[in-house]
Image (cartoon, rainbow, N blue to C red):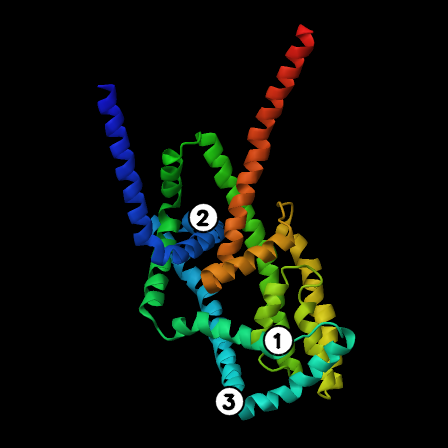
Amino acid sequence: MKEHSRFELTFFLGLFLGSLVLTFILFRPVLTALGVAAIFAVLLYPLHVRIKRVVRVPTIAALLSTVVAFLLIVIPIGLIASLLFQEARSLGAAMSAGGGWNSMMAYIAPVEAFLDTFMPGMTVDVQALIAETVNWVTRNLGGAFAGTAQFVISFFVGFVAFFYFMKDGPAFLKVLIDFSPLSDTYDRAILAKLQNTVNSVIQGSLAIAVIQGVLTSIGFAIFGVPNPVLWGSMAAIAAVLPAIGPSLVNIPAVIFLYLTGSVGAAIGLLVWGLIVVGLVDNILLPKIMGHRARIHPLLILISILGGLHLFGPAGFLLGPLVLSFVYALGDIYRELFLSHIKEASQEVREEQINTS
């Protein structure tokens, strides 16, 4: 009887694991969309709670929250992505065309010569850097604006998922807690920490980075730097590192303007970068973050770069989400499990002292 029960258990576990693997394969094409929808659901859920207080019908409240998310998030991101793709494609066309790229090299060559003066032992291939950036942007955004079926399906699934996250979010969390082998106390603590960490990373570091990237694009457009949206996007990634981040893009642009004869524009862009872009981090970040736990900027930057490599453009959010989950688990481990281990160790020491 015991062997028979053991066989049944093994068969059930194999069947269950097989079904989980099959389900993962089914969900894999839209996992990125689900992850992005979950992030925005966490960020906008407080707003949904306010809407639900006014609109008592849960379905209508969730629908209104979805409309608000579309207006506040999807449309601006879509416009920026469209401009980014157009600039990258036009720059790529100029690079592939002999005459167009030769004319651009007239501007890039002085920048390389300037860098070589200050770093004689290091070769800086600006052409290769620009080519790699343009190829990455066009490769990852091209399919979206070509209207591929995969993008349409992911977009649709993401919006439907966001609606149901708003409408049935607590019920989904309850299912996760019920199926988790951990105690409910640990599950709820992990979810609370994850929510706090996601809010601190997305609303804090990434929000400031996006604002600095937008301001950098505006400054580039005002003072005549080519392809302002493309380089503003690069500044948004670099802006995760406070203070020096946007300078990694702003300073080469100032040098570019100066070496091409636009001295006044170079001075204006330098002042814009120092005052308008630079002070955003010092003024807005403390107000947004408050007393929330902060993740080291270097780890956030690495998570963004790794996320972009692994997930494409959505990795700007999904990379920090993975990092937030690790941080949440680490906090729970430190606060709960380590405290129990220390208490147990203390009790053992006390027993040894008493017996001796």
Local secondary structure at mark 2: helix
Q: Residues within 10 Å of mark 2 (few under 14, many from 20)?
A: some
- Residue 239 coordinates in the image, percent (x, y): 64, 63
* Mark in the foreground, 3 or 1: 3
Residue on which disc 2 sits: 49
Task: Specify whether residue 73 is in view.
Answer: no
Q: Are marks 3 and 1 in contact (CB under 8 Å)?
A: no
Residue at label 1?
Answer: 218
Q: Amino acid at mark 2?
A: Val
Q: Position of residue 237 (x, y in %)?
A: 59, 64
Tell me how far mark 2 sits from mark 1, CA to CA: 35 Å
Disc 2 to disc 3: CB gap under 8 Å? no
Q: Position of residue 3 (x, y in %)?
A: 24, 22
Q: Secondary structure at mark 1?
A: helix
Q: Earlier in the sequence, mark 2 or mark 3?
A: 2
Q: Nearer the viewer, mark 2 or mark 1?
A: 1
